[in-house]
Image: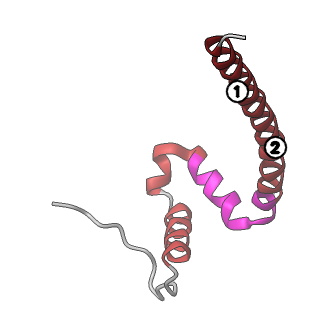
Amino acid sequence: MDARLLIRLAAVIFATAAIAATAFEMTQNEEGAATPAARSSEEITSDPLRAAQRRCQLLGEAAARDSECLRIWAETRDRFLGTAPSPTSPQLWHWR
């Protein structure tokens, strides 16, 4: 056999193995991604704060005037930042 033919054959085998490995990994990721999404939906329904955030999201622009949404956003911010909730009601910042 010619050296060029062996190199081409090796390249074809390598490319085939790479494509097969990629296809295998892609199918594994798709199956694995479905499981965390199912867990996330269970967590969303069990978390009342998350349900309230969804309600405020559905209100759209009117949520900016809704006192309950302002309270929910303040609680979400405090939870995210890891700070204790302020004893006073949340105040809006007005930029001038």
Q: In which quadrant will I find the N terminus? A: top right
Q: Which mark is residue 69?
A: none
The residue labelled by disc 1 is 14
Bounds of the magenta segment: 43-57
Give above or below for 28 relative to 65.
above
- Of residue 68 and residue 48, the one placed in the foreground of this image is 48
- Of residue 46 and residue 70, the one placed in the foreground of this image is 46
Number of other residues with Cα within 10 Å of mark 2, as a class: few under 14, some 14 to 19, many 20 or more:
few
> Mark 2 is on which residue type?
Ala
Q: Earlier in the sequence, mark 1 or mark 2?
A: 1
The residue labelled by disc 2 is 34
Q: Quadrant of residue 31?
A: top right
- Of residue 83 and residue 15, the one placed in the foreground of this image is 15
Is residue 47 shown left or right of residue 53?
right
For residue 58: magenta?
A: no
Q: Pinpoint residue 77: horizontal percent, then vertical percent.
A: 49, 70
